[in-house]
Image (cartoon, rainbow, N blue to C red):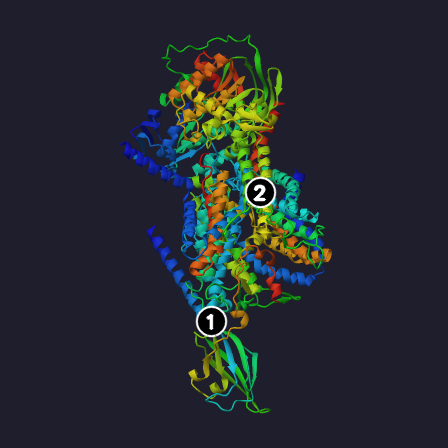
Amino acid sequence: MTEKTNTITLSDRVKDIAKDFGLPRLIITGFLVLLLVVSPFVGADLPTQISNIINRFSWNGILVLAMVPMVHSGCGLNFGLPLGIISGLLGATLSIELGFSGAFSFLMAILLATPFALVFGCIYGWLLNKIKGGEMMIATYVGFSSVSLMCMMWLLLPYHSPNMVWGMAGKGLRTTISLEGYYTQALAKILQINIGNLSIPTGSILFFALLAFGMWAFLHTKTGTAMTAVGSNPEFARSSGVNVDKIRLISVVMSTWLAAIGILVYEQGFGFIQLYMAPFYMALPAVSAILIGGASVNKASVMNVIIGTILFQGIVTMTPTVMNNMIHLDMSEVIRIIVSNGMILYALTRKTEETK
Amino acid sequence: MNKINYGDLLRRFSVPIMFVIICAVCAPISGLSPSYLCNEIVTRMGRNAFLILSLLIPIMAGMGLNFSMTLGAMAGEIGLILVSDWQIVGIPGMILAMIVSVPISALLGLFCGKVLNMAKGREMITSYIISFFINGIYQLIVLYLMGPVIPIKHSNIKLPRGYGIRNTVSLLSMRQKLDNLIPLNIGGVKIPVATFIIIFLLCLVIIWFRKTKLGQDMRAVGQDMGVARDSGIDVERTRIISMVLSTVFAGIGMIIYLQNMGNIATYSSHSQIGMFCIAALLVGGASVEKASIGNVFLGIILFHTMFIVAPKAGTVITGDSMIGEYFRVFVSYAVITVALIMYETNKRKNKSKAGEQLALAQEEANE
Amino acid sequence: MNNSKKKTLIYRIAAFLVIMAIAAVMFIVGRGHTVYFDNKSSDLVAEVPYKIEVKVDGKKVASLKKNERGMVDVMGQKLTMELVVTEEKGGEAVHMKVSQPLPYNMDGIILNIPAMLNGASQDQYVSEFVPVLSETEVAEETVVTDDTAGLMSFGEESEASK
Amino acid sequence: MSKAPLLEMKNIKKDFFGNQVLSDINLTIEEGEVVGLCGENGAGKSTLMKILFGADVIRETGGYGGDIILDSQKVSFQSPFDAIAAGIGMVHQEFSLIPGFTATENILLNRESKKKSVLSDLFSDRMDTLDRKDMDRRAIESIEKMGVSIDKNMLISNMPVGHKQFTEIARELSKEQLKLLILDEPTAVLTEKEAEALLDSIRGMSKRGIAVIFITHRLGEILAVCDKVVTMRDGYVVNESATKDTSVQDITKWMVGRDVADSDVSYVTEDTGADKNIIMSIKNLWVDMPGETVRNVSLDVREGEILGIGGLAGQGKLGIPNGVMGLYQSGGSVTFEGKDIPLNNPRKCLDSSFAFVSEDRRGVGLLLDESLEWNVSFPAMQIQDKFLKKYLGGLLKWRDDAAIREVTDKYIEEFKIKCTGSTQKAKELSGGNQQKICLAKAFALEPKLLFVSEPTRGIDVGAKALVLDALKKFNKEQGVTIVMVSSELEELRRTCDRIAIVSGGKVAGILPAGEQLEKFGELMLKNC
């Protein structure tokens, strides 16, 4: 008798877990596991693959982490991530323009990016407070507008560093700027572990861990608790004396700042600064990564960030190699588009306000 | 009372007025001749009007700006790719491409409508993501399935590797065939009469459509889904129909657009088309919940004048041609952003307005 | 109720058939061919005229001296052309109207005009043109599926193609 | 008269999850008869009408018992559309109109006159074009039938409220098959003149043979227009009599009167606390709460008392606590312990040691997706910095989960909250237990003044008693002043010291809790 009930509860629990986890997420996880299993048989080197995934994780983790505060405060998915990225880019280019070099330029880039992120974040947050309920669409277009505005600015701002401007004209920033001699691999090199083909950028991961821990800790403070409550039920928060607009503003500023730091970390891994149209669609991978990790439009945790980034980057890096080795057909780009946008679509069509 | 009306009017037409000013300032600076400008605008009117008109129906049904009109554009492109592989040329080629594209558009519109019914209240962001998602499917079909699954014979269309379509597909055989079907030239301005006739017909269809039962239902659904449902209107179905219609028209519009262009950029022609069409419509004074045929034409004139003169004016002012190009991209996005913000703030204002009135009445009573 | 449904169904089938019919007609009348005219000697004709002018729809599309080739893109299943044949240099030009059915399955069709004028059978003077791919066409092409690609190029193709 | 009645409802019974709301209702309506239906909120009027109109909610909650016989035929409507087809029309309290449509378009919404068009046969009749001329004709016809003139071409959004109401009625009248029209408080939004016009048009309808069920709190109107008045209370029909044999006083008595069987209940019958300090004084308060508008309310609350606020639904009693607490836009002045409390600022109220248990449990009262711990501790944490560990000299305020669990467990035990543990999510609890969590949340704030709004709405009898006892205990032991708003007069009488009755957005009067029921009834209907 007890045996029976136990099995029922067990299978129920499995079902529950599967339901919580969501079918698409399950498929994606299964797909990644399949790729990992198959890869040695088709001649792909597993350690290289794994270090690729870890590397990509360390580049992108913070950008995905930037989603968390706004989801928590009920502002939805931050499709306006490019705004934060632009703050980061301003910090990066200013740091180089002012003549800092080496790993120190990374620190300076963070410091220089911070005021921009705060100011942009405040304006952006103020705007989002005016249009509660329509955040996501407007965030998208605020991102787009700011990127295209900055396209003009990169040409017009008086940058002079010969490493950054077009050689011929002597003005206007290049589309890609090499970070060689500046902060390329600035974090990754710290305590880097190399075992055969496996290499782990310990520094970058530690940096991510630091920020992720900070986020986790913040969510355990009074303000962090208020933020979650605002996202969960703004009316409740208001009736409990919380200044909803202020909390939302804080979340937007945090998200923008994290995006700025995120892009700097991305650049130190990638080795280049990409300007102009590059930040345009950077929000989409980050959004789908956190959704793949188990977040929804109004719930997200640091764990979702970690799982999501690993799954997303795993698929992005594994598919091309495995596919190429298997059938000589590189469909990874198409798969990435379908999976990531499909995931966002899935999240958007979930009834998030079912409890209301 | 009159004063308030003026203010309202000014606010409603603030975007068109702003554009008139931009155009008025930039046009002389750009140094482009009026006849060149006229020619360009007439060409672009013929090229874009049909596409933009396809946006009107979802707005009527309260589904906002249809960012997923891109779906129709993709269907149109698939039609054209197939037709040019079959070597059907000229106007018959266009008609055949339309016949091929309609079922594809209808299917995509159906999908889109169903998804949007699951995401009521955030139609726009969802339709925007749908366009990306379907773009992935489109690439899957065009890049991998065309060749092995869908037969493609001609090597000037197919990639040398044996499957997939090239970056550009030439439509030389139907280039401007429709535009030049009935040649007319007034004062050096070439007028694509046949295209205009088709656009005019679509306008008539839209005007007529508003007078049908379905059009009436759509307006009702657009204004208040709950009331419409209570009165027995099948809200979901009505919304799906509006998406299907919009997508089908967008597909046909894309074919007209591409016959004017003369080639298909297989992987990018459609990707921004939605954005530019929406921007043009908004520039014409439309809003997220209200748009008319007049907005379409005014929008094309203003938006495309800006589009033509901005790079030239930018070059003259700053000496860098890219500035102007970035400027117009910025303006396109800024217009949409502003329109969306206005829409959302209005929605909130309307809500609080009712409250304010009550409060005012009570205050008066208290005094 | 049922009756009207039946009526609707009939109308729909009819509409579908009409559209299919239109599509079929389009397949036939819209088929495009590239017709190449040769003024070359062959097994059948040893001597070729000095010059042949080809006019389609009243427009001169080719003027062929000996061993020359001209071409025109045409639509439909039949090519009606006007030939102006000059046998000898300075000789009298002969005008004639020729109608030539075009085989559906050939994209490029070579017409050997002297042979045609000589009254040879269809298979003898009509042959298929098999295009040799140019180098750029053979070269592997990287597909650009960048989402931002269309951003800057909107509306510019027409100017570029002018 | 041998003719069968138009409508017969026989032994109608209905329960919501075991909670009996209608018992053995019998109602007969003749053709062209006007029946007034009155009763307090919760007496079962709306449920009865929903059953008659085939509302979805009835079917979803398990249907009803008894028979409905319309025109000598037993009917059971599966949806409102069936009811409409059978000739029953209903005008709801909330408008069901498209704001951007004209009166004509609204009157004929989804029943437009159509002309066949080219595409009708190909697609469906939805491609028919509208026949505007015929629509205008039909609209005018139904407006004339109503007897009140409204502009058929005016947009609804430009109409005064009364005309919107008339448009709705005209819509029902435009239905050819209409035999019975249900009007649910149609005069509540009308001016006196408009109401008069409406009564005239009801008389007109009756002459045309259309039966009308007229639900209203304005008893004068019932007497003026109805043939028969039916009074309901607690799910029973307590009286049915011809209008000419009755009076406003009689109806009031039937509405509120109860069989006072529980002799052990002790009421506070006298105003004993007149000498107590006035802890809070509300002056000229107006609150813009949709459906619960408050106009010009002045009210004094005495220290340590339980003040009840009662009245019919929609009269503004709920607006008072919501307005004072700053949840809805309000104006006027509130002083607490001699200090002015700024309005429209929930934080200031909470800082002044107010607490509020909202009537909207799920919308405002709870974080449904969070644990019970969070729900109980959140306001106290945010307002009073309780349950926090402070580090770095107070710079870092860390949530003290252990303290939170402790306090939550304490309340779970005290209120006997049924749950799997303090980490269970609030949405998984039953209504009664959710209400207890809301109380725990307010108690954790240790307030000086507690507003409780509809504390027993939608919860079972056991939980009801527990909640009310907890409130009384809290008041006695901690000396907390409580202002309790409830629609259930009996509950107020048993719990409170004094009861203020709100009617028409104003305080109609304040009586000691033990005062006679009729007096409360009169006050309730005073400004309706």
- Regarding residue B123, the answer to whether it shows in the image is no
Which quadrant holds residue C159?
Answer: bottom right
Chain letter of the residue beneath label 2 in the structure image: B
Q: In this view, does B330 lie above or below D64?
A: below
Mark 2 residue crowding within 10 angstroms, few (<14) / some (14–19) / many (20+): some
Residue A117 image point, x, y percent: 63, 41
What label sits on residue C31 in the rendered view? 1
Nearest the viewer among D375 and A258 is A258
Q: In this view, does C70 lie above or below D482?
A: below
Residue A21 image point, x, y percent: 42, 41
Nearest the viewer among D353 and B23 is D353
Mark 1 residue crowding within 10 angstroms, few (<14) / some (14–19) / many (20+): many
Which quadrant holds residue D245?
Answer: top left
Residue pictured at 70% horizontal, 49% vertical: A97
SS for callout 2: helix
Residue C23 image point, x, y percent: 43, 65
Badge 2 amino acid = Tyr
What label sits on residue C39 in the rendered view? none
Chain letter of the residue beneath label 1 in the structure image: C
| Marks 1 & 2, CB-CB < 8 Å contact | no
The N terminus of chain A lies in quadrant = top left
Tell me if C152 is positioned left or right of B21 in this view: left
Residue pictured at 57% horizontal, 67% vertical: B180
Q: Are marks 1 and 2 on the same chain?
A: no
Nearest the viewer among B278 and D294 is B278
Badge 1 amino acid = Arg
Q: Name the residue under label 2.
A: B343
Gap in angstroms between the C-alphas marked 1 and 2: 49 Å
- Regarding residue A139, the answer to whether it shows in the image is yes
Residue D77 image point, x, y percent: 34, 36
SS for callout 1: loop
